[in-house]
Image: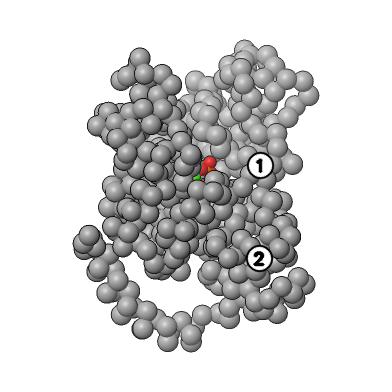
Amino acid sequence: MQRPAFIVDHLRSALVLVVALAAAAAAIAPAEASPASATDTNQGAVHRANPRGPVVWSHRGASKNAPEETTAAYERALADGADVLEGDLAQTKDGVLVVIHDNTLARTTNVEEVFPDRAPWNVADFTLAEIKQLDAGSWWDPAFAGQQILTLHEWFELNHGRAGLAPELKSPTLYPGMVENLAKELRAWGYTHDLKAKNRAPQIWVQSFDEAGLRQFHALLPEVPTLLLRSGYPFMTASDEVLTELATWTTAVAGNPVQTTASQVRRVQSFGLQVVSEVEDGPSLLSMIEHQGYDYMFTDVPNVAKAVLADKKPLRTNRGVIVDSVVYNPEGSDVAVNGGEYVALRNTTDKPINISGYTLREFGNTLLRVGDDAVIEPGSLHKVYVGPGTDRPNAHFNGLTTPVLADTVTDHIYLYNPDQVMEDLYSYIAS
Ligand code: G3P
Ligand code: CA
C-alpha cells in the first residue's frame, strides 16, 4: 500500500534534518545522563529519552480544556506544545478502530438520546455510520457541540505528523482482531519504525494494561515502541529478573511520582527501560516527575507541563480567584448534609469579586458549580461543597450523593471562568 504523502515528506525532511542536527546537537546538547549518575544502583548506563527533560504526552488530548479524544482536544494539545498525543482504541461492530476511552458510548456522547433502546451502548454494538451520528462534545460543554468520535485513520490525518501518537489497546480481549487491525493500519501509514517525532519522541508508541495483547502487538511490529501499564506500578520496584525480561520486548513501563524515588527511576532506566509517569496535572506533581528523571510526563494539561519545564508561571488567574485548599476527607460522610468534602476558593485581591458562572472540575471530570450570584469578599473564602445542603453567603452545595474528591493517591481541581478558560489548578497528595 502506498505510504501517505506527508509521511514521505516527513521522512525526507527528517533525513536532511538529522544530518544537520546531529552535528549541532553534539555541540550544544547537555551531557546525556551519565552512567555515573546511576551509581547508587549501579545497574549500568542510563540513557534518558531526552536529556533535556521529560517529553510531554497529552493524555486524551488537552482533556481538561476540551472534550477528551476529540479534534478540539487534540488541536488544543498541539497548540499547547504537546510532544505526543495519547488516545484509547475501541472497535466498532463493523471492525473499524475508533478513538474513545470507554467501552461504552454513554459517558462521552449523546448516544442515550439518539439510540434510546440500545443500552448499554457498547462501542462494539454500533457501526461506524451510527457512531458518526453522535455528538462527542456537548457532554463537556455546549460550546463543543458537533465534535465527533474519530477513527484511528482520522486521528492520523488530524495529527499529520505534528506530534508523536500513543494509541492505547484499552481492552483488546473485547474486540476480536483488534491487535492485528492496529498493526495493519500502522503498516499502511508507514509507522513500522521508531521514527523520531517532536522532542525526540517516537512517532508512534503503543501502550496497554493488557500484557498479552501488548506482547502480541510487539510480535507483529517489533520496531514500534511499547509501554506496559499496570495498576499499582509494580514494575518500579520489580526484581532484576523481571526488569531484564521486560527489557527484551517492551520499551517502557509506568510509574507514579508520588510512590517512586529518583533512584528507583534510574534503576529501571538502567535496565534499558524508559519510564513514563502516571497522569498528573498540578505544577508540583509535574515538577516531581521532572526532578525524579522520568523520560515521559503524562498530563491532561500540556500547557501547564510545558510552563513547568520552562520554569514559567503555568496559569494566570484573570480576576484574582484561586483554589485555596481542599477538604477531601472530613469526619463523617464525605457527602453529609450541610457538611462533607469541599473546595475552598479564595479572593486574593482587596476588592469583592462576583464569581457567578465560574465552575470547578476534578480529575474524574465531575462538574461543580460555585453558586448563583456568589461574591467573595477580599481575602475571604467561598466553600464549594460536593454534597447536599442549604447555601450560605460563603458556601454553595452541589447536592451530589457520591463523593468526588479522591481520598487516596492524588487528585486535581481545575477552576474555570465563565468563558471556560482554566484560571487555576490545585493538586493534592492524599496518601
Ligand atoms: O496511565 C496511562 C493511561 O493511558 C491510562 O489511563 O486514561 O486510559 O485510564 P486511562
Ligand atoms: Ca489511555
Apparent side of residue 337 relative to residue 312 in the rendered image (left or right): right
Q: Is residue 178 above or below residue 228?
A: above
Measured as percent of width and height from the top left, residue 267 is found at 70, 66
* Badge 2 element: helix
Residue 70: quadrant of the picture: top left
Measured as percent of width and height from the top left, residue 197 is found at 39, 65
**Marked residue nearer the N-terminal end (2 or 1):** 2
Apparent side of residue 26 relative to residue 159 in the rendered image (left or right): right
Residue 333 in sight in this render? yes
Residue 303 in sight in this render? no
**At 28% from the left edge and 47% from the top edge, which residue is drawn?**
154
Q: Which residue is mark 1?
A: 410
Which quarter shows the C terminus? top right
Residue type (three-letter) at the residue carrying disc 2: Thr
**At 42% from the left edge and 83% from the top edge, which residue is drawn?**
22
Q: Which mark is residue 194?
A: none
324 or 82: nearer the viewer = 82
Question: Label 1 neighbourhood size at 10 Å, few (<14), some (14-19), many (20+)?
Answer: some
* Badge 1 element: strand
Q: CA distance from mark 2 to mark 1?
A: 30 Å
**At 48% from the left edge and 87% from the top edge, which residue is drawn?**
27
- Badges 2 and 1: C-beta atoms under 8 Å apart? no
389 or 194: nearer the viewer = 194
Q: Is residue 52 above or below residue 376?
A: below
Q: Which mark is residue 244?
A: 2
Q: How many marks?
A: 2
182 or 399: nearer the viewer = 182
